Amino acid sequence: MPTGLLTTCDGKEQMRNPGLMLLMGLAVSTLCLVCQTCAGDECEYWGQVGVVMPLQEPWEIEAEETLKWREGFGGLFKHNTNVGLAYSGLGHGLDVAIGFRRLYEKEDDGLWTTEDRPHVNVKISTDIRGMQISNRSRFEYRMLEDHEYWRYRNLIKVKFPSLGTDWHVRPYLAMEPHFDMTRGGFDKNRFYTGLGFDITPRISGTAYYLLERRQSDGQWQSLNALGTSLVFHLK
């Protein structure tokens, strides 16, 4: 009859950690999913480092650098820098921000192209039974080298309660449809599953798997990515 205990090599019994077991199960399931889907689709790794610095409350500055490698770490082909100013004084659970992102992408001929992307963000969040639910609307103006257009992105995210580990690990699910406001119609959608955690009181991180469906030349294509991020929260 199950007792909810594990027996160690020295014969002692210890209580199972259900949060750790769930974490291990999620990690194994994600790796299996990546192995299956990457067999026929494009795969990438996304790495991100960010800094959050508070100003006079309720203002803060945010900066982040993102690097993207193609399948098998064949080479860096995208990187971008984002700087933003956020304000949280409009009310509980309501944040607004403005930002500017500069992007570089390596083309097939080896040349790098650039894109400038100013954006405005409105985020609404609430807690329901220990789950943190947020909805972020982003309006961005994409200034590519050959054309420009407006795009709307809607990131819906659900963070589940902490698993009870020392790093306060919280699983999450998210989706983010992209809508081309100039031509009309959805051209991309992203689905995330991952883990958020606190390494120290001033350093937080995430590890996630992403499935992206995007439209190119009238055809829908799939992209699989593994990603990690670190954010340093300055005083």
Image (spheres, rainbow, N blue to C red):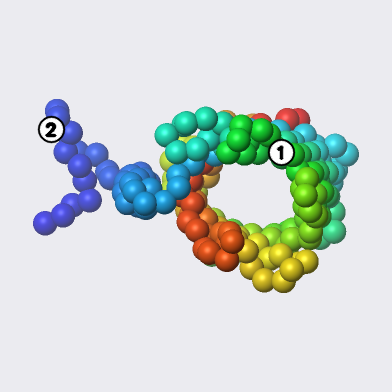
Name the quadrant containing residue 49: top right
- Distance from disc 1 to disc 2, alpha carbons, whole Å, reads 62 Å
* Location of the C terminus (image quadrant): top right
Residue 95 in picture, x, y percent from top left: 78, 55
Task: Name the residue: 77% across, 49% down.
Answer: 146
Residue 180 in picture, x, y percent from top left: 71, 65
Pointer 2: what residue?
A: 11
Residue 95 showing in the rendered view: no
Name the quadrant containing residue 205: top right
Residue 24 showing in the rendered view: yes
* Location of the N terminus (image quadrant): bottom left
Residue 233 in picture, x, y percent from top left: 69, 33
Identify the amino acid type marked 2: Gly
Task: Name the residue: 24% across, 39% down.
Answer: 14
Q: Is residue 123 above or below residue 168?
A: below
Task: Give the crowd class for mark 1: few <14, some 14-19, many >=20 residues within 10 Å.
Answer: few
Residue 194 in picture, x, y percent from top left: 48, 49
Q: Are marks 1 and 2 in contact (CB under 8 Å)?
A: no
> Label for residue 139?
none
Q: Nearer the viewer, mark 1 or mark 2?
A: 1
Pointer 1: what residue?
A: 113
Q: Is residue 155 above or below residue 8?
A: below
Task: Name the residue: 20% across, 42% down.
Answer: 6
Identify the amino acid type marked 1: Thr
Task: Name the residue: 60% across, 35% down.
Answer: 109
Using the image as rendered, state which of residue 130 and residue 159 is in the foreground: 159
Q: Give whichever of discs 1 and 2 has the lower sequence position.
A: 2
Q: Is residue 33 above or below residue 114?
A: below
Using the image as rendered, state which of residue 218 and residue 120 is in the foreground: 218
Q: Which residue is farthest right?
A: 56
Query: What secondary structure is found at the residue carrying circle 2?
Result: loop
